[in-house]
Image: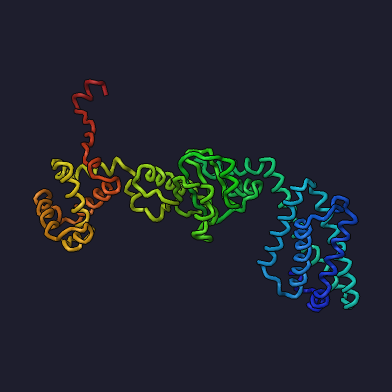
Amino acid sequence: MDPFAVVPQRLAEFLRPQLDEIAGEVEREVQLQVPEYARPADDAYVRTIRAGVNQALTLFVDRIADTGKKRDLEHVVHTYQEIGRGESGEGRGLEVLQAALRLGGRAAWRRMMKAADELTLDSGEVAALADAAFTHMHEIMQAATEGHTEARLRSSGELQRRRKRLLDLLLADLPASPETVEELARAARWPVPRRVAVIAVGGTGQEEDERQLLPAGVLADMTARPARLVIPDPDTTGPSHGRALAPALRGRPAAVGPTVPLAQIADSLRWAARALSLIQRGVLPGEGLVRCADHLSTLILYADESLVRALSHRVLAPLAGIPAPQRDRLAETLLAWLQSESSVGGTALRLHLHPQTVRYRMRQLEKLFGDSLRDSETRFELELALRAGAASGSPREHLQPVPEPVRLSVSSVRSTGG
């Protein structure tokens, strides 16, 4: 049962006007009892500590009054994580921080007991108050400890090494068990997301500088080729990821793979790397962060290029004997005609041509392809081949001869003893 639900709400109203006074007592107790905190005032530091004390006390009272919201708890947790990081940065050990929190909690508890006496709470209500106070204190201490530990690990480089091992594990050929992932993610201070997307990054950069520019929670291996970033739950933040990643990417070509469940992370990397390759070849646009989801048809076309070339060689064979400039014009016209559902007017609009020019070219194409232009399966194959040629900049490369497979006769097999 939630201990906060048992504590009488009148205690919250009794304590609320006294919060500033209680916060002052907590600060004085810590400064008197912990030598490391008896130091000349650093305004920024003092403001952070005071804000943490005030937030913790206010949230405690709000939880008793049943007005505390989850986001308020998250805000306090974030504050105490920052305090923990700051303490590590000041060079104070975790035991000093924990001692200060215990002493502060004890000072606050004395005021709670005084209030309980004045309100004549019964033994059950006092027990519930103690349970609530210890629960609240545990959450705060845990947050401060997490922040302190993370800062210490980060400063020693150990956190990055753990995250690198985690990333290698996630992208390994043989998928790891969820239990193994959870264990390593916990050691790497990485909350395991439900879904992820992988970004493949081309070019070279300054690894340490780029890592520091990445948003929190992004796993990165900038030494891999291509470099890869794992974005947790990308659909929850939308376009903000592109803006947040821009300083680290520094204009380098990059492609983000589809958002997938964590167990399918290798698929997201595979498609992102494929898209990056097509960006570097000029097939896909290279401006900004390219999303695979926006170019699925092109990625499918280029999933097996040798197969597409074989298809193109077969279905575009009637164009093979045409001189190159004319062949390109006819291929462009045929693709636009197919995409316009055989409409001359629609084709003319697509190509910014006079309809009469389109009719002239279509008569040439009908002589070359004959009745096959009216066959639905042939039309589909033609559009695939022409789209692949258009994506590469010209159909010419798709009209190069495809080597015939080697055929062995029975006699040749016998002669080799096979």
Residue drawn where x is 23% and y is 52% of the image: 383
> Which of the pair 411/209 is nearer the observer?
209
Q: Position of residue 208 (x, y in %)?
A: 59, 41
For residue 347, side relative to residue 94 (left or right):
left
- Above or below — where is 22 with respect to 267? below
Q: Position of residue 186 (x, y in %)?
A: 65, 49
Q: From where the camera sits, is residue 3 visible?
A: no
Position in image of residue 265 (x %, y %): 50, 49
Seen in the image, is 180 located left or right of residue 101?
left
Task: Give the image location of residue 226, x and y in percent.
Answer: 47, 40
Question: Which image quadrant is residue 73 in?
Answer: bottom right
Q: Observer-nearest residue: 167 or 53?
A: 53
Q: Nearer the viewer, residue 211 or 105?
A: 211
Residue at 71% x, 62% y is: 76
Is residue 189 visible to the viewer in this orientation of the structure?
yes
For the N terminus, the image quarter is bottom right
Q: Quadrant of the C terminus?
A: top left
Q: At 52% across and 58% down in the image, what residue appears?
A: 240
